[in-house]
Amino acid sequence: MRKVFINLLAGAALLTAACNNSSNGTNDTADSSSMVPVTHLSGTSSVKTNPKHVVVLNFGILDTYAELGLQESVSGIALAGTPEYLKEFTMQEGIVDVGTLKEANLEKVNEIGPDLIVIGGRLAESYDELSKIAPTINLNVDNEKYLESFKENQRIIGELYGKQEQVEAELTDIDARIAAIQAKAQESGKKALIILTNEGRMSAYGKGSRFGIIHDVFGVTPADETIESSTHGQSVSNEFIKEINPDILFVIDRGAAIKRESASVEQFANVLIQETNAFKDDKIIFLNPETWYLSGGGLKSIKMMLEEIENAIQ
C-alpha cells in the first residue's frame, strides 16, 4: 500500500536543516529541507514540497490541480489532447506543450526545469527517463483498488501543497455520494453492462477493469460476472449484448474522446440492441468520453462521473 509520510518527514527535514543553518551562521533554508519521499505506483521519489513548476501528464491529476486552485503551479501539459473541461489550462499564460499522455517530449520537459513531473499509466514505461530530468511520480489509479488508490493520490497532492483539509473535505463529500449511489443501485436491482465502442468495434468491461468503478465502487450490479478483466476489454458483438440483456447499457465512445468518428444512440442501437431492456427503458447511457476515457482519477472528474451514474440509476 502506498503511504505518504510527508508531515512527519518534512518536519524532520526542516529540523535537520535548521541545525545545519545554525552551524553555518545563516538563516537561509536549504532546498533539501523540503524534500520528502512519496511512494507511488512506479516506486518512491524524493519530492520538494509546494513545487512551483510542475509538468502534469495525467489529466485526472490535472483536474485535481484545478479543483484545489493550484493552476499556477502547472507549467507543462499534453496540450493537444486536453479534455474540454480542462481547457482553462490550454489558455493559461506560460503553459508549455510537452507531448502526449503516451509520449513525453523530453527536450521540452527539460527546458521547463520542473520541480516535479506527474504521470499516469500510459507513461509508466518512460518513468526512468523522466526521473533523470526531475522527481517523477506515477499517480495512475489502481483499478483493482480504485477508491483506495484514488484517495491516496489526492492526499499526496494535498500533502505536498498543504491542502490536507480541503482534500479531506472533498473525499468526505465523495464518500457520502458514493454511499447514496450504492444504496440506490442495490434497491433498484438493475444490472448494467459497460461497453467501449471504437469506430464499429466493441469491447465489454467488468469488475476490476479500467471502467470497473461503476461496479466496484458505485455498486451497480454487473449484467455479466464473467467478463475478463483486461486493458483493452473483452471483444463482444451485438448478439452478445442482446443475450446478456442489460437493464442499463453504459457506452463510452473512444472515437468521440479522441476527436475521430463518433456514434449516436440511434446509430449504436441496432435491431439486436433494441431488444434489450436498456433500450426499451431508455437506459442506453453514453458517458462523457473525455472524462471516462482520457482522464478520471481526479477530484473534478470523479464528481462528474458520480453525477452521470446518479442520473442513470434514478
Image (cartoon, rainbow, N blue to C red):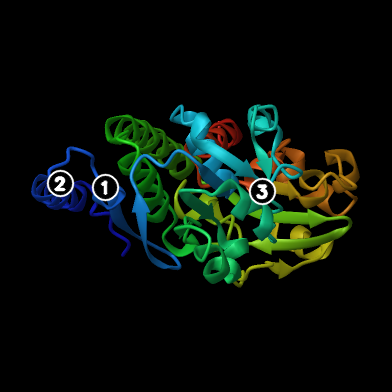
> Mark 2 belongs to which amino acid?
Asn
The image quarter in which residue 204 lies: bottom right
Amino acid carrying mark 3 in the image: Leu
Label 1 element class: loop
Quote the CA–CA distance across marks 3 and 2: 46 Å
Q: Secondary structure at mark 3?
A: helix
Helix, strand or loop at label 2? It is helix
- Across and down, in percent, residue 233 comes to 67, 67
Q: Residue 49, labelled with which disc?
A: none
Q: Position of residue 229 (x, y in %)?
A: 58, 70
Q: Residues within 10 Å of mark 1 (few under 14, many from 20)?
A: few
Where residue 103 appears, as percent x and y from the top left, is 70, 61
Residue of label 2: 21
Q: Which residue is mark 1?
A: 30
Quarter residue 180 falls in: top left
Number of the front mark, 3 or 1: 1
| Spot occupied by residue 282 in the image (x, y as percentages of width and height) | 73, 35
Label 3, residues with CA under 10 Å away: few <14, some 14-19, many ≥20: some
Position of 100 with respect to 74 (left or right) is: right
Name the residue: 46% across, 31% down: 70
Q: Residues within 10 Å of mark 2 (few under 14, many from 20)?
A: some
Task: Identify the residue at horizontal 40%, vertical 50% (top origin).
Answer: 153
Counting residues from the start of the chain, the first of labels 1 and 2 encountered is: 2
For residue 218, side relative to residue 94 (left or right): left
Cα gap from disc 3 to disc 1, whole angstroms: 39 Å
**The label number, if any, that marks residue 294 in the structure image:** 3
Front residue (pair 76, 288) = 76
Q: Nearer the viewer, residue 170 or 35?
A: 35
Per the model, the C-alpha gap separating discs 1 and 2 is: 8 Å
Q: Which residue is depicted at the point 69% across and 27% down?
A: 91
